[in-house]
Amino acid sequence: MEVEGSGTCGERKSRLNRVTIRDVAELARVSPASVSNYFHKPRKLSEETRQRIQQAVDTLGFVPNDAARTLRTGVNPVIGYIAFELAGATTPEIAAAIEKRVSAEGMYMLMANDTGSEQRERTYLQLFAKQQVSGVIIAPVGNVEDELARMRAFGIASVLSARRAESPAQASVSIDHVAGGKLAAEHLIEQGRKHIGFVSSSLQLKQVADRLNGALSAVHSAPGVKLEVLPVPERTVEAGVACADALAHRPSTERPDALFCANDLLAIGVIQAFVSANVIRVPADIAIVGYDDIEFARSTIVPLTTVRTPHAELGTAVADLLFTEIDALTAGGVHDGSGLSRPQIEFSPELVVRASSVQQ
């Protein structure tokens, strides 16, 4: 039985297989070396040259063999990004900045969510290592620096995102969360608050622990002020609402008169619950400070005082630093990192004062 069109598919496949890099180069009016660079070193080409080659590739239907190319050149056009909170309020902005920078280099980004699991985090690192990606950006849950050092030895660059590296051999871009926590607590103390509650989950997460330690340093320097840790199951609006409900059931003499929430989502939930119940006034009874300065912080029913962190700037800096690391590895300047100091960039947060913490 003859299947209509089967010959056409076979002919199409044959034509595709006969298209070569030289054909693409001729149509794009560039050298074969430029076409090769387009696929595995696009950063060497101008945007105009990349566009001409892309048009030629589309016109001819050229399909490169990625696996063979990677084996031949040792370069993969893919970057891996691992985050512990893909659905978090700040991750999308950071990821978008990274993606924009990666895309501008003619490369691609694969995102993974470790869901707060150190085991899943390591599984993704192993997966990216097997795929021989050119580089990895990771906002880690656990300590992954030994694993990243092993990956560097095999030619895979890496940058820690939102956490300062412990080893000088590991590149990182971070925010000074200790300073951020101290800013928040000092502000509340300046408002005359004596009993500060720190609301957060995942106290073992370094970024959260740093915020707590910064707040504690301010409290320890202020006689008569105490800090109470108020653990919640997650850093969400719903968890903030539940925390506020629990505080509302305490006798007024046992409640904190200020809350420092580890992120803005928690703070927004707390404010919503207090205002809705109309029992505890913000900020007259309890002043509230959040962290991150997300888009909704200024538009809550009581505008939120918060610690601003530069999300987009951090994402761009992370991507820039990763490309620097990739170039160093390609040039043979970095191996396992022994004895070499890599850049460790740190951004400073700033306090943004609004109505949730200051009585008018």
Image (spheres, rainbow, N blue to C red):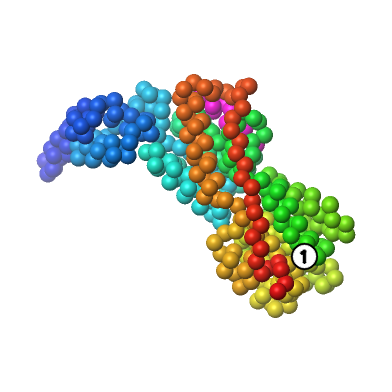
Quadrant housing residue 25: top left
The answer to if 13 sits in the magenta stretch is no
Residue displayed at 83% across by 72% down: 251
Residue 241 locus on image (x, y percent): 66, 67
Q: What is the three-letter code of the residue carrying label 1?
A: Gln
Q: Quadrant of residue 101?
A: top left
The local crowd at label 1, few if under 14, some if 14 to 19, many if 20 or more residues have their Cα within 10 Å, is some
Task: Name the residue at the bottom extreme.
Answer: 278
**Above/below status of 89 relative to 121:** below
Residue shown at 73% from the left, 63% from the top: 259
Q: In the rendered image, which residue does mark 1 sit on?
A: 191
Q: Is residue 84 above or below residue 156?
A: below
x, y percent for residue 42:
36, 33
Q: Main secondary structure of the magenta part?
A: helix
Q: Position of residue 95 (x, y in %)?
A: 49, 48
Task: Identify the residue shown where x is 56% and y is 64%.
Answer: 296
Placement of the N terminus among the 4 image quadrants: top left
Residue at image point 71% right, 47% down: 178
Q: Who is closer to the viewer here, 93 or 150? A: 93
For residue 112, side relative to residue 68 (left or right): right
In the rendered image, which quarter is residue 35 located in?
top left
Horizontally, residue 207 falls left or right of residue 93, namely: right
Q: Which residues are magenta?
A: 143-154
Where disc 1 sits, the SS reads loop
Q: Nearer the viewer, residue 158 or 187?
A: 187
In the rendered view of the protein, which quadrant contains the C terminus? Answer: bottom right
Residue 285 x/y as whole percent: 76, 72
